[in-house]
């Protein structure tokens, strides 16, 4: 089977969920090889990668890789593309991942596809473009296909791989050292999952009515173990912080379940969530555009529906 490189996303040595998704996707198309860049590699990390099908693990655990911004990872992947001749390279469609993909495309004279929500035979990618108004299929026709895949677009499935280790030595070019990381600040995190990676997202919009009422949305999210999102109207009104905005000018999410409460479904918001596997809309306006997109819809006052839903979820725990 053809080898497919997967760039591992990790924090403090812990493999992030999006990497498990990429390994699952790569496994359907070839033999996944995980690429570990930077310090933190451990027996636990190897076990997790093996659990989700990594046949090989390229380990470049030099601290120097994370001393500089993005460029070292692109150089590492370029070196492996040259030596291993993989069938494709998969990265997470995060801000950093997409920059790595772009730099790698230049270094290897290859085509790059970003924000893929699916990948089929021949590395044909499914993408949602023009603000979510058009779904297309795209294929790289030059060099090694480099594909940045949206988090949560593939459900991770365990399937044991050999995870044979291969140490990789990397000598960074002077160009890769032009932007150095001088400080890292740890962002405080709550108990809820990260919005961009959450499997379930509960979002509130203008219909929530006030900042105080967002507690209704938060209680449902906590009952489901979900992340909280908000529409642009809600964040612009100051009802919820802007970093939780879902939409074309906010974050793009692709969860397994998306609950939109009090959100009309304007194209700006739809662009950030329409690739969710299942969409549930709660809105008192039966003509709201969100119902055109929803798999299930509830016409009703969210102030009554959402607390009842939360109560039912709590009963089943």
Image (cartoon, grey):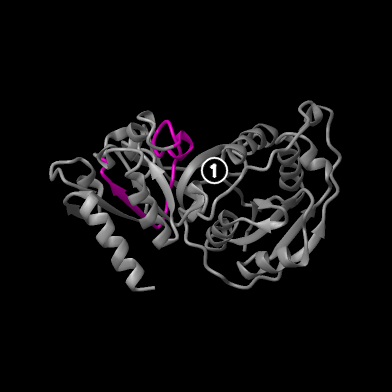
Foreground residue, 183 or 310?
310
Foreground residue, 151 or 218?
218
Q: Mark 1 points at which residue?
A: 93
* Residue 141 can be seen in this image: no
Q: How crowded is mark 1: few (under 14 residues within 10 Å), some or many (20 or more)?
A: many
Residue 262 magenta-drawn? Answer: yes
Q: Is residue 174 above or below residue 13?
A: above
The residues colored magenta run 241-263
Residue at (33, 51) in percent of width and height: 216
Foreground residue, 32 or 249?
249
Q: Position of residue 200 (x, y in %)?
A: 41, 56
Number of marks: 1
Q: Position of residue 78 (x, y in %)?
A: 72, 41
| Image quadrant assignment for residue 19 | bottom right
Residue at (76, 27) in percent of width and height: 179
Residue at (52, 39) in percent of width and height: 113
Among all residues in the image, which is located at the extreme front? 212
| Image quadrant assignment for residue 52 | bottom right
């Amino acid at each position: 089977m053809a080898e497919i490189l997967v760039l591992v996303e990790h924090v403090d040595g812990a493999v992030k969920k999006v990497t498990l998704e990429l390994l699952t996707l790569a496994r359907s198309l070839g033999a996944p090889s995980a690429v570990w860049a930077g310090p933190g590699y451990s027996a636990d990390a190897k076990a997790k990668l093996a659990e989700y099908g990594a046949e090989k693990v390229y380990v470049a655990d030099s601290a120097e890789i994370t001393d500089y911004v993005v460029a070292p990872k692109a150089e590492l992947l370029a070196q492996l593309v040259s030596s291993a001749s993989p069938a494709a390279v998969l990265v997470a469609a995060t801000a950093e991942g997409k920059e790595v993909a772009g730099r790698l495309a230049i270094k290897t004279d290859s085509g790059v596809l970003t924000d893929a929500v699916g990948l089929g035979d021949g590395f044909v990618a499914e993408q949602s473009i023009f603000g979510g108004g058009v779904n297309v299929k795209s294929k790289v026709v030059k060099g090694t296909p480099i594909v940045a895949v949206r988090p949560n677009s593939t459900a991770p499935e365990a399937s044991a791989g050999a995870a044979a280790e291969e140490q990789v030595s990397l000598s960074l070019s002077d160009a890769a050292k032009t932007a150095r990381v001088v400080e890292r600040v740890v962002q405080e995190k709550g108990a809820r999952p990260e919005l961009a990676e959450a499997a379930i997202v509960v979002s509130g919009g203008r219909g929530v009515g006030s900042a105080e009422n967002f507690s209704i949305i938060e209680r449902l999210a906590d009952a489901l173990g979900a992340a909280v999102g908000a529409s642009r109207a809600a964040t612009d009104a100051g009802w919820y912080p802007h970093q939780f905005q879902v939409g074309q000018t906010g974050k793009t999410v692709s969860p397994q379940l998306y609950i939109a409460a009090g959100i009309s479904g304007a194209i700006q918001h739809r662009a950030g969530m329409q690739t969710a596997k299942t969409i549930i809309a709660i809105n008192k306006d039966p003509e709201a555009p969100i119902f055109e997109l929803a798999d299930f819809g509830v016409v009703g006052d969210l102030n009554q529906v959402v607390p009842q839903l939360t109560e039912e979820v709590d009963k089943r725990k």
